[in-house]
Amino acid sequence: KQEVTQIPAALSVPEGENLVLNCSFTDSAIYNLQWFRQDPGKGLTSLLLIQSSQREQTSGRLNASLDKSSGRSTLYIAASQPGDSATYLCAVVSGAGSYQLTFGKGTKLSVIP
Amino acid sequence: EAGVTQFPSHSVIEKGQTVTLRCDPISGHDNLYWYRRVMGKEIKFLLHFVKESKQDESGMPNNRFLAERTGGTYSTLKVQPAELEDSGVYFCASSQVTSPNYGYTFGSGTRLTVV
């Protein structure tokens, strides 16, 4: 059974800092790993999707890496801004058929102006 | 294009009552998923529709939950009778293609509180 763990559960940083969020998963047989952002009272916004054959994906100030063999991913946020404050969720797709997402509990990020 | 729409956004009901949640996926999206997040836990998969057919309902917690997708368009998730442990946020997501690498669009969720 696939399990996803995110560390830390919460993180508070001053504006301008670079930061790293961590995600680990127990079963390396995945199709992809996805990072989402959730703002209070809002839905999930997809940030990055890394296919199992890829090592990393970049979008603006975000860079996500994937080490499938060790079951780890990191989300790097450069030059953090107060608008980055949100909960960041890591999820993997593994198993055939429904291609359901298995989520971690998330990391709540606060960027202090 | 319009996104995934869920309503109501909030619902407070008493234990034993019935509640129906609705999800309107993006037009043309054959795949529709329901997920749930209960307090302090991770978001968990409930079920997956392809058009009007249930592809996978392995995540449905028990037979008090009934999901339907009429004509392959919108979907409803009925909880009858509701219990306290059903409280949480129910998310719907849709995808155009049945492919793991295509991506999903999520709705804003319905926050259900059972008192």
Image (cartoon, coloured by chain):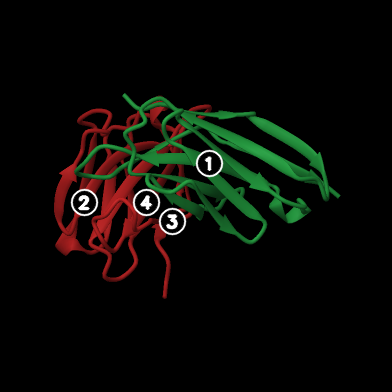
Check the residue under mark 2 and report the chain it is in. Answer: B
Q: Circle 1 marks a residue in which chain?
A: A
Total marks placed: 4
| A98 on left or right of A37 | left
Give the residue pinned by disc 4: B92
The residue that label 1 is drawn on is A89
Callout 3–callout 4 Cβ contact below 8 Å: yes
The picture places residue B104, in percent across and down from the top left corner, at: 38, 56
Q: Which residue is mark 3?
A: B107
Q: CA distance from mark 4 to mark 1?
A: 16 Å
Q: Label 3 vs label 2: CA separation?
A: 16 Å
For the residue labelled by badge 3, is the local secondary structure a helix, a strand or a loop? loop
Secondary-structure class at tag 1: strand
Identify residue for label 2: B49
Residue at mark 4 shares a chain with residue at mark 2: yes
Q: CA distance from mark 4 to mark 2?
A: 11 Å
Q: Examine the image and state in which quarter residue B94 appears.
A: bottom left
Look at label 2 and name its amino acid. Answer: Phe
